[in-house]
Amino acid sequence: MSTKRSNGQNRQSPIDISTSKAIQSPEKCSPLLIRFNHGDCVEVTVNEEGCWKVSARLHSTSVIRGSHLTGTYRLLQFHAHWGGSEHTIDGKRFDGEIHFVYWNTRYFAPDEACKKSDGLAVLGVLIEKGAPNQEFGVLLKYIEESNKTRKAVKIPITFDPMRLVPKSGLTRYFTYLGGLTTPPFSECVVWTVMQTPITFSEAQLKTLSTMTDENWRECQRLHARKVYSTKAV
Ligand SMILES: [Zn+2]
């Protein structure tokens, strides 16, 4: 767990989401449009800290759209946090959380987008211990290989990230304005956190914890921010 706290800013992430305080707004929270194109997720890398990341190709056409997002956001990478989720719901911490990171195509490049208040969109999918996720099982082999070699490992074109996204999450989610949960904690993220978790098996979670015990940041203060939701939870 990172002990780094908010550096005096007012839209840090993650946060605890209170379902009773979330404002239901069908206008703000239209059904999400998520498109993953085969072959856009090219390789996985594991860093020094034992955290993995799947990178999308530069001109990926995998996108996310929704009425809370200003324009089209293009997939950049996805990764996960485990040993606990980053966002909590009514104080409940889940077993992990996947983050799909997208950048706003109205900006020139991802680096440029990170300097804007609506530069990135991150889709958070909570993970709960349960049945194994088959698609993650496929990915896990490549993660383990990269963990051993510390090199980027290509993943097959058939890998389908949509199988890591709960279908009901497209119409059941929370959104708020926040930032990156890892350094430099830039406040450039429009967050979308799906209400329904997916499941990973105990063995799958255990494999991740052998790489690093946990890698989540503690919840940050909401300050004056509002959390919007699709409908009653
Ligand atoms: Zn993350």
Image (cartoon, rainbow, N blue to C red):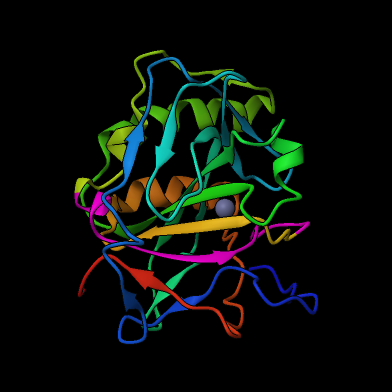
Q: Quadrant of residue 117?
A: bottom right
Q: Measured along the vertical axis of the image, is residue 17 above or below residue 128?
A: below
In-image side of 14 versus 173 (left or right): right
**Residue 181 is inside the magenta segment:** yes
Residue farthest to the front?
27
Near-viewer residue (185 or 134): 185
Rendered location of residue 65, percent (x, y) = 40, 41
Residue lying at 57% horizontally and 61% vertically, measured from the top left = 214
Rendered location of residue 224, percent (x, y) = 58, 85
In-image side of 32 versus 52 (left or right): left
**Residue 116 is inside the magenta segment:** no
In-image side of 116 versus 128 (left or right): right
Rendered location of residue 3, percent (x, y) = 72, 74
Q: Which region of the structure is painted magenta? A: 168-184
Residue lying at 54% horizontally and 57% vertically, measured from the top left = 190
Image mark count: 0
Q: Measured along the vertical axis of the image, is residue 163 above or below residue 32?
A: above
Quadrant of the snapshot with the N terminus: bottom right
Quadrant of the snapshot with the C terminus: bottom left
Residue lying at 20% horizontally and 75% vertically, measured from the top left = 232
Rendered location of residue 111, percent (x, y) = 76, 38
Q: Measured along the vertical axis of the image, is residue 89 above or below residue 100?
A: below
